[in-house]
Amino acid sequence: MSYMEILTLGNECLKQKALPVEKIGPEYIKIAEDLLNALYEGEGIGLAGPQVGLRERIFAIHVQGDSPRIFINPSIIETSQETEKFEEGCLSIPGTYTNVERPRAVKVQAWNEKGKPFTIEAEGLVARVILHEYDHLEGILFIDRISEQKRNRLLEKYEKIASKSKESKKKP
Ligand code: ZN
């Protein structure tokens, strides 16, 4: 069970830049586990600290066919010139999906939950998830990467979904 609650659109935490982790102590093993559990409960493929109210530069990803990975203090070393459009969603904006253009490949350096540094070169969906989660650390959401017109349409739809789910939560 996860003790982390996923924050949704409108929460200020999602718009703030996350701070670097100063020391990756043993507590990060538990934080990583909680983050992954929240990710699985939400049935997502990536979840970043700010989405659960943790203002630290940490995110978890688990793309099918790949192992779960924790990124702490990640830095993007390189992105491909070539871009790709693909449908994205976000656990913080449930029920909304749209095509987002991003680099097709990325090279990232980070530390894992045990404090071990690593570098990963990824492409396709894994690269996309890494870039989406990295954006969260900068206070950027995927809807900030689409046109204003598309964003407004998406937000209208989201408001309808969000108000419906609030109503159903009111029922005993
Ligand atoms: Zn997201």
Image (cartoon, rainbow, N blue to C red):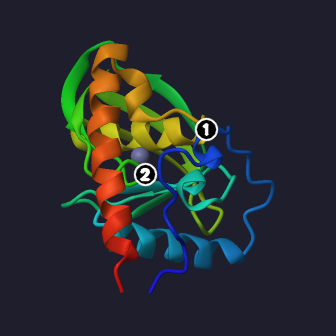
Q: Quadrant of the C terminus?
A: bottom left
What element does badge 2 sit on?
loop
Q: Nearer the viewer, residue 163 or 89?
A: 163
Q: Quadrant of the N terminus?
A: bottom left
Few, some or many residues within 10 Å of mark 1 (<14, 14–19, 20+): some
What element does badge 1 sit on?
helix
Residue 132 image-quadrant placement? top left
Residue 90, given in percent of the width and then of the height, sits at 35, 47
Residue 25 image-quadrant placement? bottom right
Q: Is residue 144 above or below residue 20?
A: above
Residue at 33%, 38% (x, y): give it.
127
Amino acid type at mark 2: Ser
Q: Is residue 117 above or below residue 78?
A: below
Chain-order first, disc 2 or disc 1? 1
Q: Is mark 2 within 8 Å of ligand 1?
A: yes
Residue 42, given in percent of the width and then of the height, sits at 34, 67
Few, some or many residues within 10 Å of mark 2 (<14, 14–19, 20+): some
> What count of labels does the image hold?
2
- Residues at circles 2 and 1 in contact by the CB criterion of under 8 Å: no
**What's the CA distance linking mark 2 and mark 1?**
12 Å
Residue 167, given in percent of the width and then of the height, sits at 34, 66
Amino acid type at mark 1: Lys
Residue at 47%, 53% (x, y): give it.
8
Residue 116, given in percent of the width and then of the height, sits at 61, 60
Left or right of 57 on screen, residue 78: left
The reply to whether residue 169 is visible in this rendering is yes
Q: Nearer the viewer, residue 131 or 98?
A: 98
Residue at 34%, 24% (x, y): give it.
152
Per the rendering, the mark at residue 15 is 1
Per the rendering, the mark at residue 92 is 2
Q: Is residue 168 above or below residue 19?
A: below
